[in-house]
Image (cartoon, grey):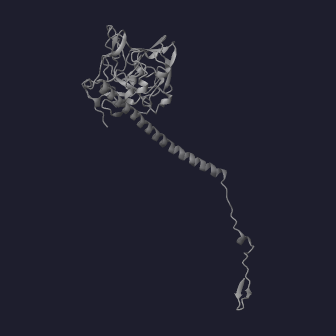
Amino acid sequence: MKLRLLPCGRTRIIAVESICPSKSGSTMRSQRNHRAFTLVELLVVIAIIGLLVGLLLPAVQAARESARVMSCKNNLHQIALATDMFHSAMGSYPPARYQPRPGDDSSRACGGKETTWLVRIMPYMEASNIERQWDYGLAYASHTDQVRSQNLPMYCCPSRRSAGDAIGLGDVIGAGTTWITLPCGCKYPVPGGGGTALGAVGDYGGNHGDLSPGSSGLPTDFNYGGNGTGMIISSRARCTNGAPQGWVDRIRHASVIDGLSNTLLAGEMHVPIGKLGQSPQDAFIFNGDKLYNFSRIGGPTAPICSDPRAEGNDLVRWGSWHGGLCQFALGDGSVRAISNQIDTETLGRLCNRADGVPVTLED
């Protein structure tokens, strides 16, 4: 509609135009046909997505394992630093445990069932509150379940367990004894028949050395106090009234003749898959009663365990769940990954602190 203003102020309608749209279907709305997926097309899409997930999953798992390996490496580094700080404070490395030699006189004949080096280094890992609950002159089994079960996250390899899972159930009373033969030819008692108790389990052990001292039942055997060739070895106790009041056999920096960077300090202990929390395969790391609880040896007849499921005579061997490698802290605090296939003679030289043939690990 158009309007014109006249001089008198009136308006006049001059035209009317229709502005209504056409009622035809093409101008009122657009019609579109929506085509749905068929079942076959949907299944193809799902299959493609599944294929992509399958391709990405190994990469994700590899990235996660790489992160776990780095975390394990950091744990060993922390243990090495704490052990070295213990050395600075005490003038020697901690004893792996108290252990008399057969035939020792009364001043050295006590001990053998107390706790281990992993408790002694706790103050240097910001865990003095836990360490203070231990009595080094008291048998491990005499401590409460609560004390025995307290663990540190740094003692657990994330490829194997978390700190919250690092509690085992085993026999610490020893009323019944079953004997097993280790790869060294020596025999060790396996818990059986006595009462069971809780205790912390873990994945890192001290380097007790190689088998060069012998393992034939003589007082010179590697497992007795002062005989180990590694850096964290069993020591005879200094006895007062039949109770340990310190240790005799001290390993110092100067004792590592082959060099701190050429000698293993600690590493990953072999624990079979499927045996976590079960003694003796996954034993109490704070129990000094048995060598395989907290230490390992290496060399001929004791290679790094390449089968993570191996049981039986593998209790004193190094090993990990990382696949093809095992991580170690050296005396200088560095951490190295060593192939499970390393020559056993070379491994033995790395474990022996003073064999006169230092081995340098290549990058």
Where residue 51 appears, x then y in whole percent? 55, 46
Of the 4 image quadrants, the one containing the N terminus is bottom right
Vertical arrangement, residue 43 with respect to residue 358, above or below:
below
Where residue 345 appears, x then y in whole percent? 31, 25
Vertical arrangement, residue 102 with respect to residue 8, above or below:
above
Q: In this orientation, does residue 125 appear?
A: yes
The quarter of the picture where residue 135 lies is: top left
For the point 45% across and 37% down, the residue is 65
For this view, does 215 lie left or right of residue 27? Answer: left
Asked whether 275 or 198 is in front, the reply is 198
Q: In this orientation, does residue 199 appear?
A: no
For this view, does 315 lie left or right of residue 36? Answer: left
Asked whether 17 or 21 is in front, the reply is 17
Where residue 149 appears, x then y in whole percent? 48, 23
For this view, does 6 lie left or right of residue 77? Answer: right
For the point 47% across and 39% down, the residue is 64
For the point 72% across and 70% down, the residue is 28
